[in-house]
Image (cartoon, coloured by chain):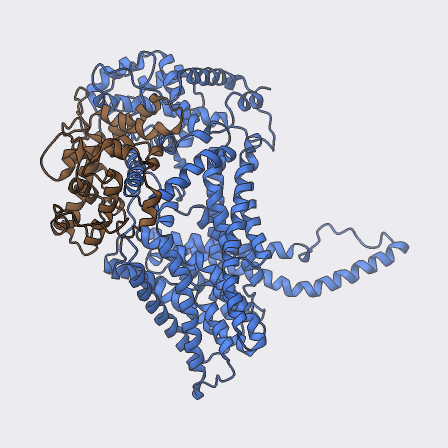
Amino acid sequence: MGASQTRPEHNYDDLTDKSGFSQEQIKNLYQRFQQLSGNHEKISRDDLDRIPALNNNPIRKQIITAFFDKRNQHQNDVGSLDEIGFEQFLMVMSHFRPVNSTATEEEKVTVRKQKLRFLFNMHDTDNDGIITLDEYRTVVEELLSQSGAIETEVARSIADAAMLEVASTNVPHMAPDDFYEGITFEHFEQILKGIEMESRMSIRFLDMNTATMRCGKLSS
Amino acid sequence: MAPIQRSSTLRLTGLLCLLFLVFFSRGFASHDAVSEKSSGTIQEDSRGQANSTAHKKTFPVLSFNYEHVRTPFEISLWILLALFMKLGFHIIPTVSHIVPESCLLIFVGLLVGGIIKATGEQPPVLDSNLFFLYLLPPIILDAGYFLPMRPFTENIGTILMFAVVGTLWNVFFIGGMMYAVCQIDAAKLAHVDLLSCLLFGSIISAVDPVSVLAVFEEIHINELLHILVFGESLLNDAVTVVLYHLFKEFAHEQAITVTGAVLGVISFFVVSLGGVMVGVIYGIVGAFTSRFTSYSRVIEPLFVFLYSYMAYLSAEIFHLSGIMSLIACGVIMRPYVEANISHKSYTTVKYFLKMWSSVSDTLIFIFLGVSTVAGPHTWNWIFVIFTVIFCLVSRVLGVIGLTAFINKFRIVKLTKKDQFIIAYGGLRGAIAFSLGFLLNNNEIKNLFLTAIITVIFFTVFVQGMTIRPLVELLAVKKKKESKESINEEIHTQFLDHLLTGIEDICGHYGHHHWKDKLNRFNKTYVKRWLIAGERSTEPQLISFYNKMELKQAMMMVESGSAAKLPTIVSTVSIRNVQAKGSPKPSRAISKSREEEIRRVLRANLQNTRQRLRSYSRYELLNDALEDDISEARFRKQKEMERRMSHYLTVPANRQETPPVRKVFFQPEHKVYTYDDSESPRGRASPSCADDVSELKETPEKPDQSSTPRANRDAELKPKEQDDQGDQLKVSRCLSDPGPNPEDDEDSTFLP
């Protein structure tokens, strides 16, 4: 890998504050970024597409899209980018940082909301603030896409049942003619409160070594 | 107060009857020796005389021969005693709130032992053979088969640390400190050498799964702590086995050599990995066998039990860790076997395992009490007291030290409260006693046994009784009610894939990456071999969904009744969720398959009325009457609910998926008891016409406005109901890979 120079534009301290990673972690992630981008400054979707290990992942499209989604940048923008720089890469990664064990309850709640928001954005592709039945159906279909010849009908009935469950828990009494528009963020939080997001949705960032990074190298 | 008095008098009479029975059998035991001899002589006499005067002795109309059935009779009596005790404790709830069941059972054992001793008999001691070969395996199998895999694998590193390093630390600390204590002149224990002390340490330091299960099951702490302590108690068996045999061998030679130590380490790996391998082999063979058991469903559960038991015994042959083998077998076998066996067999397996482990558990504690009264004791104040103290101290130190180390690698750190519960939950139990009992008979053995029993009593009584109030006091997180929700399942899987993807993008081969690889390997190769038929390609989400639908259908059938309608949580139905004008809701199976199944079911329902049932002991007949009753109730149920939810059910030709309610499901390993009170009320003639008329007669909906609709509903063509009933039965059939509806039912039912 050689001696990685600290690029003058990247102020590591600044990044540490924004993303919450440590210097060591940022260095490691930067090396990975360089590898993915082929030593350019920005990554495009194709760069991520080329990672071989992702081929087996049924939701790779959504994952890659999430990186280029402006909503995940902790700013109030919407829309998507074509390329992202290191800072944006880091911001997306920061969603997966484990929460500090020393964090207070409020901090944990904030982190939890953040992670749930990320998930919500992944499902809510048209960015109208709710997950409609069609969007949810897409999610389930994608999840089952790798499992062979599953008919879409199965996926749809599962998605329907899930949607119904959300509606039943959140809006218990609906008249027969009411229409449940879709899952709002509050409902989303409600149904997933059984899963401890702050611990479940995190990966370890510290112990990466260059050997494994070489294994994941792109063929180019 | 009256019911309590009544139940306590009941219990008292029961207890007295039992004690009487015990007396009786004991009495006979001593009479037997005499009567046998005399009957023997009489017989000889009679035979001798038979040649000469055959008709002199009258034919014994009623004779008495107790010796003949003695052993099984006594065993049955003991088991009955255990069961009555268990029943008694549940009838009287006040005591069992304060004192855990295990304590009460030991106490009863003490009583019974005392009574037996008072009659002059030698009370039976907990034979180690009996314990290790018959009493322990059911408990371990039950635990292993229903081991919650996700928390177990997520915490496997921590569990292994506690099990291996923690136990090693305990052994050497206790052994060393006890040796130091023995050097004190005042103790008069100079004859106890270092090796014996280490041997003692290895016996006493292992956390016992039986006690942990018995106590922790009653306090319902959160899953993480439960799996940590419980997993540790299971996995430390390998360490215990190795150290025990090691020190026992070396006790002969009075010295430990370096080669000995090295061999010990190697032996540890051989014992643990060998045990696991034996279990895995048996598990795979068992799973493979279950692929073919559709030809004879009745014996399916036996395969599960026997393969697991054989795994345990095979491991014991080579002095490998039987417990780890048993756990490995259960864990490996379970996903594949469950996909293959019928729903009834699954229930049977579950119930039998629960039953056996429950009986074993009770018997073990009672025998522990009896053995305490029986065994020769050498009470040495200093030795015993220091043993107890050092056990506690070493446990606390070990847990604190290990947690400090482990927390560096954990995402969810262990808090001080967690550490306290883990330390406090380190209970000793019958395994320690049995191992001590296996020691060679010498003067030290009684000393050790006394100390072991004291420690067991201390941990079970003191720690067992106080852990519940402590848990309340410290406000430790309790087990959350597991509502199996399809959303959580979807998102759990989604998260798995997401995190694997992120790890791949990071280039980091972490936890999720390997788990994903394992899953894919499982799906492409293993499942194809071990699961029969179509189920092998069924993704997990779909199996989950089907299971859920099945459970819901069953719950609706059982929980509802003619008089009492289930409290419907919400009036939301599928119509509210789907956009107007959206295409017709989907099926769970292909249309052609559904038609086929429907056709067969309809044909079958007709056959039902004309069927002659031939009784066969070897075939498990689907109790069609039972099915029909459930079917009828089901249909009635559905009708009622639909009325309640203002739902006009005129599906043109198809019915939508039943409204999914968030119902509380029992977690899988709990035994679900069906409310049998409804069965007498089921009508015996379930024809569609009857149903319709019934519905007209029972307007029980609380909502008056739906009455006009009800009438309209009741006028639906019987065909509709048939459809719906079939539909629901179809969804039941789908997740129940029971006997092929096309084949078995026809062959069994037609005369």
**What residue appears at the point 31 percent right and 26 percent down from the top-left corner?**
A141
Q: Residue furthest bottom?
A: B185
Q: Residue at x 28, y 36 (%)?
A: B491
Q: Decide which of B508, B498 is in the foreground and name it.
A: B508
Residue B309 vs residue A62: left or right?
Answer: right
Residue B484 in the image, given as x and y percentages of width and height: 31, 38
Q: Could you say which is closer to the camera, residue B116 or residue B360?
A: B360
Q: Is residue A35 left or right of residue B44?
A: left
The chain assigned the colour brown in the figure is: A
Q: State the count of labels.
A: 0
Q: Quadrant of the N terminus of chain B?
A: bottom left
In the rendered view, would you say B338 is above or below B406?
above
Quadrant position of the C terminus of chain B in the picture: top right
Question: Is residue B383 visible from the viewing direction of this image?
Answer: yes
Question: Horizontally, is B382 left or right of A37 in the view?
Answer: right
Q: Residue furthest right?
A: B52
Q: Is residue B736 visible?
A: no
Examine the rendered structure and indicate whether residue B6 appears above or below residue B674.
below
Whole-percent x and y of residue B432?
Answer: 48, 65
Residue nearer the viewer, B235 or B45: B235
The single residue placed furthest to the left in the displayed view is A76
Q: Position of residue B382 (x, y in %)?
A: 42, 81
In the image, the chain rendered in blue is B
The answer to whether B524 is drawn above or below residue B218 in the figure is: above
Q: Residue furthest front?
A: A2
Say which residue appears at 24% left-offset and 38% top-offset. Answer: A37
Residue B364, percent from left and from top: 49, 59
Q: Nearer the viewer, residue A113 or B22?
A: A113
